[in-house]
Image: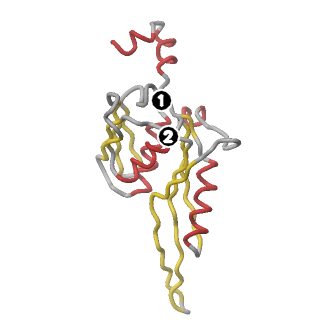
Amino acid sequence: MSNLILNKVKAGDLELKEKVVAINRVVKTTKGGRAFSFSALVVVGNEAGVVGHGLGKAKEVQEAITKGIEDAKKNLIKVPIMHGTIPHEQLSKEGAAKVLIKPAAHGTGVIAGGSMRAVLESAGITDVLAKNLGSANPHNVVKATFKALATLREPIAVAKTRNISLKKVFNG
């Protein structure tokens, strides 16, 4: 988890694009009848290595989305991207959701399911293979994907740690 803190980014002057992943209508039964409210799961990113996710809750859908965007801007991280893909394979788990993301060759595209696709595209990853291995709950899938991207290691940092060249890191 310490890696999550190291990758934090401030929203400042970034040109962020929002994607609504899921909107959920919640009903609370009171003695006066039913009270409806909405929760919105939103992903924001600059499509150049910065991505964040947030949850907003309100009585109106638009207000919930706005709150989700504000929350997402508080949870931004930097993702290491090399040649449009991730530097290495990563497996992550959040709740019952298990996510596997693998680097892919140029031209492959983003091969991922619904909520995972939104996170990967917002991060600016253009070629990746991703698989949801557990629960399809969008909240947990987004969190697991986010955790997987946050724990990715920079190839240059790996090369420095091992005292070898960057070429040797990739050619093994």
Measured along the vertical axis of the image, is residue 39 above or below residue 43? Answer: below
For this rendering, which residue is in front, 154 or 3? 154
Q: Position of residue 77 (x, y in %)?
A: 57, 39
For image coordinates 37% across by 34% down, the residue present is 127
Outermost bottom residue: 32
Outermost right residue: 12
10 Å crowding of disc 1: few (<14), some (14-19), many (20+): many
For image coordinates 52% across by 18% down, the residue present is 157
Q: Quadrant of residue 129?
A: top left
Relative to 11, 172 lies left or right: left
Q: Position of residue 97 (x, y in %)?
A: 36, 50
Measured along the vertical axis of the image, is residue 38 above or below residue 143? Answer: below
Q: Position of residue 98 (x, y in %)?
A: 34, 45
Q: Amino acid at mark 1?
A: Ile
Marks 1/2: CA distance? 9 Å
| Tag 1 near tag 2, CB within 8 Å | yes
Q: Earlier in the sequence, mark 1 or mark 2?
A: 1
Badge 1 element: loop
Which residue is label 2 attached to? 123
Measured along the vertical axis of the image, is residue 106 above or below residue 70? Answer: above
For this rendering, which residue is in front, 47 or 169? 47
Which residue is label 1 attached to? 81
For image coordinates 61% across by 37% down, the residue present is 8
Relative to 139, 35 lies left or right: right
Numbered label attached to residue 115: none
- In this figure, which colouring scheme has been used for the structure? secondary structure
10 Å crowding of disc 2: few (<14), some (14-19), many (20+): many
Measured along the vertical axis of the image, is residue 166 above or below residue 38? Answer: above
Name the quarter where the C terminus is drawn: top left
Q: Quadrant of residue 70?
A: bottom right
Badge 2 element: helix
Q: Amino acid at mark 2?
A: Ala
